[in-house]
Image: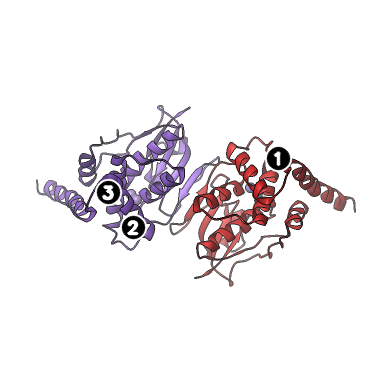
Chain colours: A purple, B red
Amino acid sequence: MTKELVFGHQNPDTDAIAAAIALAYLEKQDGYETEAVALGPVNPETQFVLDYFGVQAPRVVNHAQPETDQVMLVDHNEPQQSIADIAELKVTHVVDHHRISGFNTAQPLYYRAAPYGCCSTIITQMYSEEGVTIPKEIAGLMMSAIISDTLLLKSPTTTDVDRDALQALAEIADVDNYEDYGIQMLKAGTNVAAKSAQE
Amino acid sequence: MTKELVFGHQNPDTDAIAAAIALAYLEKQDGYETEAVALGPVNPETQFVLDYFGVQAPRVVNHAQPETDQVMLVDHNEPQQSIADIAELKVTHVVDHHRISGFNTAQPLYYRAAPYGCCSTIITQMYSEEGVTIPKEIAGLMMSAIISDTLLLKSPTTTDVDRDALQALAEIADVDNYEDYGIQMLKAGTNVAAKSAQE
Ligand SMILES: [Mn+2]
Ligand SMILES: [Mn+2]
Ligand SMILES: [Mn+2]
Ligand SMILES: [Mn+2]
């Protein structure tokens, strides 16, 4: 089986990182040889999340070749938001919650999109459909992604599916009060950004 | 709720018709006000299928407006294979098993694609995921679509998922020997076509 890189968009946010890690794990259960990577360093909010759940930041890559020419995209589909050599690669899977724009393939593929507030919400559904248990730390990452993308379920893009997924993930991640956690997490993003601006 | 038309590609084949009827029914259970239509008259093979399972051919339409401006596409995504006024419509759902080409949206949507031999195979999965019972006649149509698209599971595009779906659908449709049925069905397509060519 060909190795496949799994990644979110450039300038990754928490959803881009969480969704990549979560999809890479899920597809590994289906027999794919996947590795979650990132198209840039993680931001302070995501670093807080990774530290909290004891997960290492994905390796940063700029090109997929010559490592591999098969990739899976999460949290984006537009080529200009993707990896530098996207035009030369075969995209085998996409999971996304954005409009579709400029995305063309030569071959049929797996494409899973829904108009939810967060890509990790769709991946949470996929775990459930495939009967795969979500590891505790991956539940923590996806829970954080939903909090991040929906601003604690307050953004107008929030759906009931996001609400239900957040509840379920918080339970698996063993986070008693996701509001308290979420405020800490969102603050971690802003505080550090503010600090480095002052320095 | 806005009425939505559900249809397959121009010059509809059995999968385009079956998938439209099956998705329209499934989304109705989710509260959408759907109607399956067709972008052209059904071919002799599909007419055999509809007669066999006692289903009426969908109404033929050329434009969605002014009836509605919301649509769901099955068995295609490329605008040039779609309804005449596709550029002015909002596509809310796509279920397809082809490459993605020239398909762009202004808004997020439901998009479900997989590299299987038949679109009806994906819709069979969706019924199962959503826990919706497939009505007997819709199972018959989707079974026929899989036989049609995969030439009785012999085409190189056939996957194990198609094989499993065909078995399950034949049982629901109460078809004891789907090979016998399939040969009759494929013959109905060729015979009538041959006959009208001679006339
Ligand atoms: Mn994002
Ligand atoms: Mn996102
Ligand atoms: Mn077709
Ligand atoms: Mn088809």
Q: For residue A163, which numbered disc appears in the image?
A: 2
B182 lies left or right of B24:
right
Residue B8: x %, y % from top left? 62, 55
Q: Nearer the viewer, residue A130 or B105?
A: A130
Which residue has dot 1 on it?
A: B152
Question: Do discs 3 and 1 belong to a common subunit?
Answer: no
Read off the chain for label 1: B
For label 2, count other residues whose C-alpha is less than 10 Å away and answer few (under 14), some (14-19) or many (20+). some
For the C terminus of chain B, the image quarter is: bottom right
Judged from this view, the residue extending furthest toward the right is B199
Read off the chain for label 2: A
Judged from this view, the residue extending furthest toward the left is A199
Residue B184: x %, y % from top left? 79, 46
Does the residue at mark 2 contact the one at mark 1 (Cβ under 8 Å)?
A: no
Q: CA distance from mark 3 to mark 1?
A: 47 Å
The amino acid type, in three-letter code, at marker 1 is Leu
Q: Nearer the viewer, residue B31 or A83?
A: B31
Asked which secondary structure carries label 2, the reply is helix
Q: CA distance from mark 2 to mark 3?
A: 12 Å
The residue located at (59%, 46%) in the rendering is: B121
Mark 2 vs mark 3: in front:
2
Q: CA distance from mark 2 to mark 1?
A: 43 Å
Which residue has dot 3 on it?
A: A144
The amino acid type, in three-letter code, at marker 2 is Arg
